[in-house]
Image: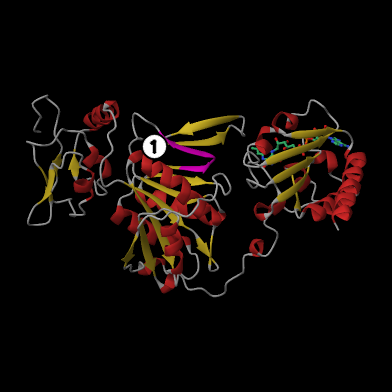
Amino acid sequence: MAKTPAGIEIPEIIPDKCIGCQICISKCPVEAIKLTPDGKAWIDPEICEGCGQCAEVCPVEAVDLDRTERIKAGKRLRDKPFTPVSGQVVSVYIEIRNGKAADVSWELVGKARELADKLEARLAAFVLGSDVEEFCARAGSLGCDEVHLLEHDTLKRYVSSLYGHALSELAHKVQPEILLMGATSHGRDLAGVVATHLKTGLTADCTGLDIEEDSGLLLMTRPTFGGNIMATIFCENHRPQMSTVRPKVFPMPGLNEKKWKLIRHAWRPPESSVPELIAFIEDKSLLGIDITEYPVLIVAGKGACSKDSFPLLEELAGLLGGVVACSRPVVESGLMPYERQVGQTGKTVAPKLYIGVGVSGAIQHRVAIQGAERILAVNNDPDAPIFQVADAGIVGDYAQVLPELISRLKAKVKNHE
Ligand SMILES: Cc1cc2nc3c(=O)[nH]c(=O)nc-3n(C[C@H](O)[C@H](O)[C@H](O)COP(=O)(O)OP(=O)(O)OC[C@H]3O[C@@H](n4cnc5c(N)ncnc54)[C@H](O)[C@@H]3O)c2cc1C
């Protein structure tokens, strides 16, 4: 095997295995790989620095590089200071269901714009579906440089194998460094399929994203060990770096005046994965209450989990234009449905006002209310952890505090009439 002057082994292409996909060409940081007239990749030993990236990205293992050499190459690459490569892409998948885009997709466009600016990269949106072109303009107006549109009749309904194939094919074409998706039931399902197709890692349910200054790697933060610690995870050797992020973690971005372009893609579904739909069952959760959409949440905890407390909680919610949500024990007691649960295994919320009634403020609950503008806690234990994050607190029994609050609010409303 050939070596560089520094004695680093240079990889070789195995022509019989190479399918001419050119992924290695696009990934080579020193442009040492060319396509021969017979459609095979060829590595110029004069230019190659032996970084081993081509071996990492080759989908058919047509790059011959010893495993130990690969490990050494990976280390050399990590030790190298990061310099932005022009042409890098940060991408966001725009989730569209029942003719509506998920808000989390736009929230991610805003965050991805920041990440792309740090990397001096382009920001791309992936819009997939049937009859979904109208969503491209929104993606462009919120800061994307380019919007990739893939439309096909078979994408009218979400089928993971079809969407997975289509989005993976788009990612293969665009070669993003980063691919972000909403941690909704749709996004969680699709992200797993796409990460498997692309043979890359996936950090699910993130609550924070950033770029590491030295390496340019995406830092993906999420709660772990039952929410007791926050772990920051990165994906060193595979691309794209994939992450799903919960709704309401990032704010909705404002309008961005920059120019953007629309790029259409043709796609042919793989025959083997086009299922025959016999019947379609409507998603009932879309018909219920979405607690993330309310400006005020009255959150019932185990300390206010009784049939008698609910009329009070509902009345307070009604007066403030909000809705009643709850902690996990309340769902477990059967008093409220899961769709109302706030927390690590429930929903992340960012209301203008959160009122926790009989909520202790366990870490698995607190992690999902960080985005609330104001937190008010009602609890009979002055040492309850919820008071550590509350802007205001009332120490007392909810059965006495809530009627008093309600009557004062009513009096206020009356004075304004
Ligand atoms: C992996 C994992 C995931 C989890 N996911 C979630 C999640 O998504 N959401 C979630 O909420 N939890 C979740 N939990 C559970 C979490 O650890 C806590 O057990 C839970 O949040 C506690 O709920 P609570 O505050 O309602 O109840 P408690 O912790 O029992 O607190 C009840 C509070 O009510 C107060 N109180 C009692 N009586 C009154 C009264 N009369 N008036 C006023 N205050 C009163 C008490 O002082 C106490 O502070 C998860 C746990 C794990 C391990």
Residue 141 image offset from top left, x and y in percent = 43, 58
User: Where residue 5 sits in the image (x, y, percent)?
Assistant: 8, 26
Q: Main secondary structure of the magenta part?
A: strand
Q: On the picture, is 89 further left or further right than 311?
A: left
Front in this rendered view, residue 341 or 351: 351
Task: Say left or right for 382 vs 120.
Answer: right
Which residue sits at x=55%, y=68%? 98
Q: Residues within 10 Å of mark 1 (few under 14, many from 20)?
A: some
Q: In the image shown, does 413 or 284 lie closer to the viewer? A: 413
Residue 131, by quadrant, is: bottom left
- Residue that label 1 marks: 235
Report which quarter residue 218 is drawn in: top left
Q: Position of residue 410 (x, y in %)?
A: 88, 52
Colouring used for the render: secondary structure
Q: Quadrant of ligand 1?
A: top right
Q: Which segment is the magenta one?
A: 203-211
**How far across and down, in percent of the image, does residue 121 sit?**
32, 45
Answer with the quarter of the image where residue 125 lies: bottom left
- Residue kind at label 1, given as amino acid type: Cys
- Residue at position x 86%, y 58% in the image: 417
Q: Residue at x 43, y 46 (%)?
A: 112
Q: How many marks?
A: 1
Q: Is residue 100 above or below residue 228?
A: below
Q: Taking 249 as reference, is 284 above or below it?
A: below
Judge whether residue 63 can be spotted in this image.
yes
21 lies left or right of 317: left
Residue 403 within the magenta-colored segment of the rendering: no
Nearer the observer, 314 or 142: 142
Mark 1 falls on what kind of element?
Answer: loop
